[in-house]
Image (spheres, grey):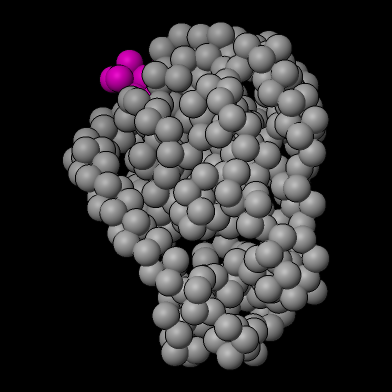
């Protein structure tokens, strides 16, 4: 999209208070352009019973764009032609990705490879060899540039097709010992970040990073993972997105193998070689997924018509039942639609107003709750 006014406005909308991925999509769908959405936010927040969220300062956006230029990076917005179709299918796709390197790697089939940070030497060797073989087959390897398995996966696919998704800014090196690897990937692979330059990675950023890793790929391979680890979160997100989940088995005597063995017991495909991966993902038709995405976009346009009608019709008597059904415990949006008896666009608009007013929190799995 480049640095057009619309790109500037979209980035400003994304960086504004109370604007998450779901809210961003709904605002763009409702108003068509980011500029119109920015103008409408104060009124929507007032209807939701709160103050208007702080709109990102224009000077801050100018500074971010300058930082992106200085890094030799660019913005990829949701809706751009090069934006990955599979990632766009998520319920909360990143509205913008900042990137350095070879954007064309996103057009290849992708497989994610994740695992333990404190991985064994044998597992790291296996991950390197496996990533190398998968990349040689014309598939991009996606991982998170963490220590252990992630690093081994990038090393194995470096120079062929490696994509690193990081939790902080493009210019922040985490872990510090991977600075050289990160710089190399930015030159001969592809480096992706959702956060602005200069952002130090925090604990809350990693689950967002993991959803991008899982969302880009046809399937996720886990090699050594402790129970309740970040790698298992990525595997769960992949399963929720309808992608393949694969795991390499390990010794029951090694705690680092428990997560993978548990995944296999719960239905993940056991992986022992590159052929196992290729066999599993070769029937995954990206063109069919693109067609499905096109159908979804057409449905969204129809929703937008209903959404427009809801805007003119929504009143206190319709907003009240939605508010009364909400509490501190997260509830599915579909359940709110069912119990309120209101049209889905009406419920979505009520939730949008409440979120912009700072009264609503969105959770994973299309669930919402009142803000504590």
Locate the C terminus by quadrant: bottom right
* Number of numbered discs on residues: 0
Q: Is residue 29 left or right of residue 319?
A: left
- In percent of width and height, residue 22 lies at 55, 56
| Quadrant of residue 282 within the rendered picture | top left
> Magenta segment range?
132-140
- In percent of width and height, residue 103 lies at 45, 20
Q: Is residue 262 above or below residue 230?
A: below
Toward the viewer: 1 or 170? 1
Report if residue 139 lies within the magenta region.
yes
Toward the viewer: 78 or 165? 78
- In percent of width and height, residue 37 lies at 59, 51
Q: Is residue 139 above or below residue 371?
A: above
| Quadrant of residue 351 within the rendered picture | bottom right
Toward the viewer: 56 or 294? 56
Residue 77 visible: yes
Q: Is residue 228 above or below residue 74?
A: below
Report if residue 308 lies within the magenta region.
no
Residue plotted at (49% across, 57% down): 30
Q: Is residue 289 left or right of residue 102?
A: left
| Quadrant of residue 331 within the rendered picture | bottom right
Toward the viewer: 247 or 100? 100
Q: Is residue 35 left or right of residue 128?
A: right
- In percent of width and height, residue 13 lies at 65, 44
């Amino acid at each position: 999209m480049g640095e057009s006014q619309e790109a500037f406005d979209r980035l400003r909308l994304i960086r504004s208070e109370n604007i998450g991925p779901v809210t961003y999509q709904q605002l763009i769908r409702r108003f068509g352009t980011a500029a119109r959405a920015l103008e409408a936010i104060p009124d929507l927040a007032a209807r939701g019973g709160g103050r208007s969220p702080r709109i990102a300062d224009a000077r801050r956006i100018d500074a971010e764009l300058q930082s992106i230029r200085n890094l030799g990076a660019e913005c990829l917005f949701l809706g751009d032609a090069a934006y990955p179709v599979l990632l766009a299918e998520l319920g909360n796709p990143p509205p913008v990705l900042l990137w350095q390197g070879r954007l064309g790697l996103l057009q290849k089939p992708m497989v994610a490879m994740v695992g333990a940070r404190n991985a064994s030497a044998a597992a790291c060797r296996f991950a390197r060899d496996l990533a190398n073989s998968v990349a040689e087959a014309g598939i991009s390897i996606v991982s998170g540039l963490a220590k252990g398995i992630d690093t081994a996966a990038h090393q194995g696919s470096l120079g062929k097709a490696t994509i690193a998704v990081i939790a902080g800014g493009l210019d922040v090196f985490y872990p510090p010992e991977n600075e050289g690897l990160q710089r190399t990937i930015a030159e001969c692979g592809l480096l992706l970040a959702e956060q602005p330059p200069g952002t130090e990675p925090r604990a809350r950023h990693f689950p967002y990073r993991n959803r991008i890793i899982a969302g880009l790929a046809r399937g996720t391979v886990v090699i050594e993972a402790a129970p309740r680890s970040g790698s298992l979160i990525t595997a769960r997100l992949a399963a929720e997105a309808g992608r393949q989940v694969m795991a390499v088995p390990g010794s029951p005597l090694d705690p680092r193998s428990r997560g993978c063995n548990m995944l296999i017991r719960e239905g993940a495909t056991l992986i022992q070689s590159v052929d196992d991966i290729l066999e599993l993902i070769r029937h995954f038709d990206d063109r069919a997924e693109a067609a499905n995405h096109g159908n979804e976009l057409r449905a969204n346009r129809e929703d937008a018509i209903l959404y427009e009608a809801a805007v003119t019709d929504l009143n206190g008597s319709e907003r009240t039942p939605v508010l009364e059904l909400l509490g501190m415990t997260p509830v599915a949006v579909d359940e709110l639609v069912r119990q309120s008896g209101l049209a889905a666009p009406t419920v979505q608009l009520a939730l949008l107003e409440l979120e912009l007013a700072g009264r609503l929190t969105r959770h994973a799995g299309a669930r919402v709750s009142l803000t504590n």
